[in-house]
Image (tube, rainbow, N blue to C red):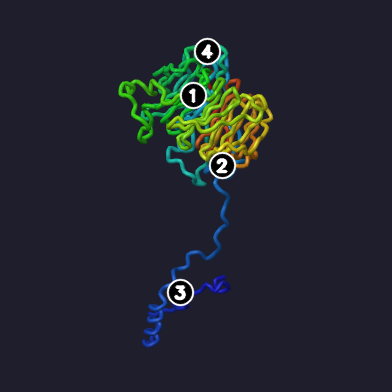
Amino acid sequence: MELQAANIFYYLTYEGAVDLDTMEDELQRSAIEDQIANFGQTPIQIFRKKHPRRGPPIPIARPLCFAPDSINLSSIVSSTSHSPSAVLYVGTLDSNIVLVNQGLTLSVKMWLTTQLQSGGNFTFSSFQEPLFGVGYDVLSARKIASPLAENVELGAQCFAILQARTESFLISCGNWENSFQVISLSDGRMVQSTRQHKDVVSCVAVTDDGSFLATGSYDTTVMVWEVLRARTTEKRVRNTPTELARKDYVIAETPFHILCGHDDIITCLCASVELDLVISGSKDGTCVFHTLREGRYVRSLCHPSGNALSKLVASRHGRIVLYADEDLSLHLYSINGKHLATSESNGRLNCVELSKCGEFLVCAGDQGQIVVRSMNTFDIVKRLNGVGKIITCLTVTVEECFLAGTKDGSLLVYSIDNSQLRKASIPRMKSKSSVSG
């Protein structure tokens, strides 16, 4: 092979080409030593055969990108409540799963991953088999929040997880007193209730770094709030008044910005530090962009048919997706307001989420299916069939597993499929896990 490729060196530089110790002619020996010194030493040949062919990407690293077919329904955690109720919200926080059921019942469960079960660091080694599941209760089911306002439709848009420096909280809204509430996820107690809107608070959103909270209301306004116990170490945009920075407050008592521009109820929100945007959707069919830090109006989008917006998401790459229940269609826009694509959902969608990388759109609803689309082309990447249950909420974990709550109170876990592991692990996960209604 080397000869054919003309990839050879001077023959005296190869190991074992000559044996100087047995050479009797001093003149020849001296000449060969000079030649070796001049040409140097060729390294020892390590491999005597071809390298093996490169294998496929390891699915556990980024399954949605490299191996979407490896993701399948791996376990079903049924409700143990005597009167099962729909799961309104499911979210992940480090190694925990946060669940809110109909009737405002909060519970926190352990999210078991390869890292936790092996007791070591999470790696992308091919020798480490993927295994995910739901474990024991970290916080047992308990009632939260105040009585609901009349005619309020609770959903995932009414809840958000806020991770502060030393503690984590659930933000809840939709109550009759026109406030939003901050609930500790360590013990379930309410630590703050803030009332500044003039009507019912209909939706909430938290930035990824936990530094800002946005709230939308029936009063058609959006308020942006500073988080006083935020994890971020960035310099504040403005100085918070001393009297507001009390130790017992998580969120500032007065809003950082009050944003206007809608003529009807705010139905959905997105807040992004990376994009420096607060994007709000309304029942009036418009989507309004404001800057997060300055509260400056940027632009407005209108639904192509003027239908009330039900859900919206915005990726870190500047792609925005709008959805309306009235026409059951998804619309993809650029951050500059250009309409890029439209796709029918083939049924009502109850949840529209993004993967952590922002490259995939994950949707689910009354059809009981989870559909994964590319945020670049809007093409369907993967369609996951359920078990005939209406999916009411969904989240995508950092490992790119899907946790879906259903109308009957069950929790569906979609993770990397390993048929050999599944036979041994699923019965164990079912026996340890439950979702309280």
The part of the image, by quadrant, that contains residue 334 is: top right
Q: Which residue is mark 4?
A: 149
- CA distance for labels 4 and 1: 19 Å
The answer to whether residue 424 is above or below residue 77 is: below
Q: Which residue is mark 1?
A: 222
Kind of element beneath mark 4: loop
- CA distance for labels 4 and 3: 86 Å
Kind of element beneath mark 1: strand
Q: Earlier in the sequence, mark 3 or mark 2?
A: 3
Kind of element beneath mark 3: loop
Q: Earlier in the sequence, mark 1 or mark 3?
A: 3
Q: Which label belongs to residue 7?
A: none
Q: Which label belongs to residue 14?
A: 3
Q: Earlier in the sequence, mark 4 or mark 1?
A: 4
The quadrant of the image that shows the C terminus is top right
Q: Residue at x 56, y 44 (%)?
A: 59
- CA distance for labels 2 and 1: 37 Å
Q: Which residue is mark 2?
A: 63
Kind of element beneath mark 2: helix
- CA distance for labels 3 and 2: 46 Å
The part of the image, by quadrant, that contains residue 371 is: top right
Q: Is residue 351 left or right of residue 96?
A: right
